[in-house]
Amino acid sequence: MKNQESTAASTLDMKTGNKIMDWFKQKQNRYALTIISLVMMASIWSLSNDMRWLYLLVYVWFGLVYGMLLQYGRFCMASAVRDLFAVGVSRMAVGVMIALCLYSLVAAIVNVSGFGTVYPHPLGWHIIIGGLVFGFGIIFTGGCASGSLYKTGEGNMASALVLVSISFSQAYFVNLGSWSDRLAPASWAASALEKGMPEELSVTHGWFDLFTAGYIWDLKAATLADMLDITQPIVRSFFANSLLVTILPACIILVLLYKFYFRKGYERKQKIEQATMRNHLQGIWAMIISSKNTAIAGIGLGIFSGLHVWATGALRESYNIFNFGELLENMGYTSGLSIQGTVFDPGYWYITTQEAQWGAWVMENMGVDMRSNIFFGLENGVPNQLINAPGFMSIGIILGAAMLALLRREFKWKMPNLETAIFALAGGMLMGIGARLAMGCNIGAFFATVANGDPSGWLFLLGMVGGGYVGVKVFNLWLTWRTSQADDCAFL
């Protein structure tokens, strides 16, 4: 009997061993394993040199997680907008709302614990206009800021072109030069001069400087709890900033998505003639779980976005710093810091500003003065990209998406044709300009903002949806014209 059990166990071990060997023999699995192995070795090497690099590595590893979740759920806010207006599908929009609600709950816990790192955005017209420009651009690129990163990880070179375009368009836009001063209202110039810029920035360096110092800095930034003057931590975080700003509006949007996009098909499929409240609640639940992958991705993104805030906040307290620039300076890396000794360090999931730094770093190494402006010179710096923590978060998103795409057999090099490349570059440029006008993209100006109690994020979403709607109409007109041209050529 014992011999039979021993033989069965041995056979099982051999089968398991063979399966493992077969797994390693598959090329895609080896590539995925190589990616994670290289990241782990680089992490160990960095920490062996200085444990303080842990701060940068937090961005790297959360980037990997974001990339895997985005790829797993095909999670893209451009798809959410496009699918609603082009084909009437609400799946992705539902996933975004789920992620938003969960992020707000985790963010509330983090903020009550005292480790919050997200600050509200100045409230003004620039948010809607920036959202409109950004939303129009995403329709032509086929991906939002985060979507372009994970699609690049899948081997989509059109999305890589979008990243290039976003990076350089932002860097150029914030550094237009004094020729563009005349495009700004005189009131902006007067307000900017009153503030007394540092000597290095005493001569305004373009429209964006005047926009920042003469307009943005005069606006108020506040969460709903700030507006209501609520100071009790739990009431402030869970009731005002989470429930009122995030969860209730998100639930209203879910009901509207059900009513206008999901209900008719659901009732027809279930053969419901006279729907009751119970039927509607079941229908909303069916809508939420209609795409398991998107729902899971939304849950994961919501939870890990909040954990990311907690991790960076805890490390800041541990190192007694407010900004990564202080830590870099303590470690002897002063090159690339801003006048204030800072670098861009949001402390949470963010996309576009670090990509602007990519473009600025390349332009600076080509001899262009990129620091005589407020955006880089005073606030964000242009660090060496080997020590740019948020930049590595974006790289982590690409690598995380690539790793999971390889494991799921969904990685494929895709080279764009000329038309797709032009759309990618033009759309990316609009996304970059829109992101700078709104002071963030679909993540920084909407997702993280709303989840942390800042109502201004809903303004960005309103603008992005409006821009996306116009973009879908314009894109359909283009397709109709191109089809008619093709038909005319075929007839001739």
Image (cartoon, helix red, strand yellow):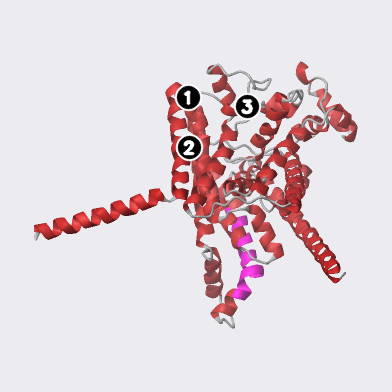
Q: Give the image location of residue 96, x and y in percent.
A: 59, 55
**Disc 1: CA contacts within 10 A as few (<14), some (14-19) or many (>=20):** some
Instruction: Mark 3: give few (<14), some (14-19) or many (20+) Cα within 10 Å.
Output: many
The image quarter containing residue 199 is: top right
Q: Can you tell which mark lies on residue 343?
A: 3
Q: How many marks?
A: 3
Mark 1 secondary-structure assignment = helix
Q: Is residue 5 left or right of residue 46?
A: left
Q: Is 378 on the left or on the right of 252, as rendered?
A: right
Q: State which tag comes first along the sequence, 2 or 3.
A: 2
Q: Which residue is mark 2?
A: 113
Q: Is residue 55 above or below residue 246?
A: above
Q: Is residue 300 left or right of residue 210?
A: left
Three-letter amino acid code at the position of disc 1: Arg
Residue 47 position within the rendered picture, expressed as x and y whole percent measured from the top left = 44, 26
State the image quarter where residue 351 is shown: top right
Disc nearer the start of the sequence (1/2): 1
Q: Identity of the amino acid at label 2?
A: Ser
* Distance (Cα) linking label 3 and label 1: 16 Å
Tell me the amino acid under the disc marked 3: Val
Residues at circles 1 and 2 in contact by the CB criterion of under 8 Å:
no
Highlighted range, magenta: 247-265
Residue pointed to by mark 1: 52
Determine whether the residue tagged by mark 3 lies in a helix, strand or loop. loop
Q: Secondary structure at mark 2?
A: helix
Q: Residue at x 54, y 51 (%)?
A: 411
Q: Position of residue 252 (x, y in %)?
A: 62, 60
